[in-house]
Image (cartoon, rainbow, N blue to C red):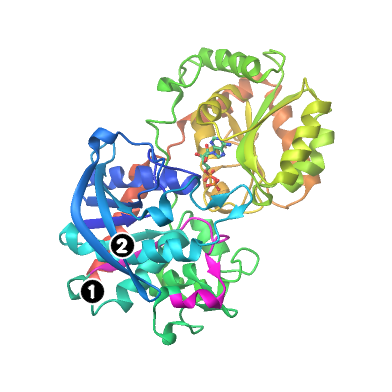
């Protein structure tokens, strides 16, 4: 079986969030299960890659964009594990700093950039041998599934290819005004509510949802939630209509990258059987971010986009109260200017309690996972979430809101049985969040109970193998249906 995975980011080449982690890890896990996988990405300038491994193919893709034909070259390289990667070259779209925009906002030509990329994908497939499944991710590649249908006449050899769309966050849909319709060069029949039309605009993600043979999202709970108005961001009806084709498959994590036994970014290795290194990591983190080095003060870590989705409005509400407690807080993130300002002010006021780093810093993210006692993720919604799963492996106890993937990965600690891997709360309110943190802090004060919780957390297994098996089962199902 040959699966082509198309996305706008993949670790180790380029990443802005969980999407990049997934596309970086899932292909290798599928390959280990005997599936042939190829990856397609835009050839952004600034990709982290070994130039020596890069090969220029002599393929020339002819991609319709508006009333023009854009020709694009294709570069070939491979993932560290050997999965082939094809990079579609179009400097007018991808030779710039940033993937989707600048700190001032989205690029104004994103409709065109990703219409081009999505249409280049079916144009590339005939060069890749027999393809069974085209697996697209998020709005940036969703249109490829529309073009697979619409361009069937141009590519008769693709008639047996089955399409899968994975939604990593339904909050990002690629919605553009109707005046961009000419870019897609599609018949007007596609600008209707049963296709891409969405309240008078063009919705790329919707196009993918209605065209795919199966739609997945990144946790079972989120798959249910997005069919409701609270979480569906306007697409709840479209998703509910595709209920039969919609499944939630939890992301795995790459334990080669995220394990305290062999993490090159942390001060000392440790494991569930020998936790001594964790105290060294805590002291190292405190020193690195300029907090007083106290072994016994609970240290809470946050690594996150600074966005309302991640619960920063709740955190803003409780911050003054929280920072008067006997604890320390380290926050690594970047995003909304209003949260950056608020936390910068708080960090000035509480220098011994709050360390703030406004940055995207992978090494520091690892240090925070290892050095903190608790990890805070009070998201309003969370399709899957990766940081809480990394935290489990580092014995850093997650405090989470039970929504989406957080609900599917963190079991609330039950003092009666000693079972559970973290602390969770349901109602989205500052008071309830504060009560949940207090419950965690109270448990922290009983070291033997806390150690048990750490062991429970570190033993939880969310490796990619399990998720990859679920994807393979789905691929077989859609291929079987053809
Ligand atoms: P999302 O994709 O919604 O941002 P996830 O938890 O699914 O959230 O994935 C976030 C990924 O990005 C994780 O690998 C996390 O470590 C990383 N990350 C987020 N913010 C930062 C940051 N400021 N510095 C370093 N890594 C970050």
Q: Residues within 10 Å of mark 2 (few under 14, many from 20)?
A: many
Q: Residues within 10 Å of mark 1 (few under 14, many from 20)?
A: few
Residue at 56% across, 17% down? 281
Above or below residue 38? Residue 344 is above
Residue closest to the eye, 128 or 313: 128
Q: CA distance from mark 1 to mark 2?
A: 21 Å
Question: Percent x, y for residue 451?
Answer: 58, 22
Residue closest to the eye, 114 or 357: 114
Q: Which residues are magenta?
A: 161-182
Q: Is residue 168 magenta?
A: yes
Ligand 1 shows up in which quadrant of the image? top right
Q: Quadrant of the C terminus?
A: bottom left
**Location of mark 2 (residue):** 121
**Location of mark 1 (residue):** 482
Going from N to C along the chain, the mark reached first, 1 or 2, is 2
Q: Is residue 324 magenta?
A: no
Q: Quadrant of the N terminus?
A: bottom left
| Residue 213 visible from this viewpoint | no
Question: Percent x, y for residue 45?
Answer: 40, 44
Report the side of 160 relative to 380 (left or right).
Answer: left
Residue closest to the eye, 236 or 396: 236
Above or below residue 267? Residue 116 is below
Confirm or reject: label 2 Cβ below 8 Å from ligand 1: no
Report the side of 157 relative to 348 (left or right).
Answer: left
């Amino acid at each position: 079986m040959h699966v082509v995975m198309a996305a706008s980011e993949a670790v180790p080449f380029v990443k802005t969030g969980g999407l990049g982690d997934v596309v970086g890890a899932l292909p290798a896990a599928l390959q280990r299960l005997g599936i042939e996988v190829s990856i397609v990405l835009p050839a952004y300038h600034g990709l982290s890659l070994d130039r020596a491994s890069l090969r220029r193919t002599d393929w020339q893709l002819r991609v319709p964009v508006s009333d023009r034909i854009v020709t694009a070259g294709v570069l070939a390289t491979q993932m560290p594990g050997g999965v082939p990667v094809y990079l579609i070259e179009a400097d007018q779209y991808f030779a710039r700093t940033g993937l989707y925009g600048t700190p001032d906002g989205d690029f104004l030509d994103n409709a065109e950039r990703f219409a081009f990329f999505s249409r280049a994908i079916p144009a590339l497939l005939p060069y890749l041998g027999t393809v069974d499944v085209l697996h697209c991710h998020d709005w940036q590649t969703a249109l490829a599934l529309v073009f697979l249908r619409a361009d069937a006449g141009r590519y008769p050899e693709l008639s047996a290819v089955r399409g899968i769309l994975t939604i990593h966050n339904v909050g990002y849909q690629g919605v553009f005004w109707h005046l961009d319709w000419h870019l897609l060069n599609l018949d007007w029949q596609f600008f209707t509510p049963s296709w891409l039309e969405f309240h008078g605009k063009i919705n790329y993600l919707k196009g993918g949802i209605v065209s795919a043979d199966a739609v997945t999202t990144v946790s079972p709970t989120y798959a249910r939630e997005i069919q409701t108005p609270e979480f569906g961001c306007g697409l709840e009806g479209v998703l509910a209509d595709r209920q039969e084709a919609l499944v939630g498959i939890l992301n795995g994590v790459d334990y080669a990258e995220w394990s305290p036994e062999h993490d090159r970014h942390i001060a000392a290795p440790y494991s569930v059987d020998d936790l001594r290194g964790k105290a060294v990591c805590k002291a190292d983190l405190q020193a690195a971010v300029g907090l007083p080095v106290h072994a016994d003060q609970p240290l809470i870590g946050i690594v996150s986009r600074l966005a309302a989705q991640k619960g920063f409005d709740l955190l803003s509400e409780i911050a003054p109260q929280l920072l008067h407690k006997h604890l320390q807080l380290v926050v690594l993130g970047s995003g909304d200017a209003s949260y950056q300002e608020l936390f910068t002010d708080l960090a000035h006021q509480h220098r011994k309690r709050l360390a703030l780093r406004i940055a995207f810093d992978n090494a520091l993210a690892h240090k925070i996972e290892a050095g903190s006692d608790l990890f805070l993720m009070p998201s309003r919604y969370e399709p899957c979430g990766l940081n809480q799963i990394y935290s489990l492996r580092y014995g850093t106890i997650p405090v989470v809101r039970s929504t989406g993937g957080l609900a599917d990965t963190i079991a609330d600690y039950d003092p009666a049985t000693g079972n559970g891997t973290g602390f969770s709360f349901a109602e989205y309110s500052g008071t309830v969040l504060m009560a949940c943190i207090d419950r965690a802090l109270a448990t922290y004060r009983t070291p033997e109970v806390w150690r048990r919780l750490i062991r429970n957390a570190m033993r939880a297994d969310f490796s990619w193998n399990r998720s990859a098996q679920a994807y393979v089962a789905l691929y077989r199902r859609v291929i079987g249906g053809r």
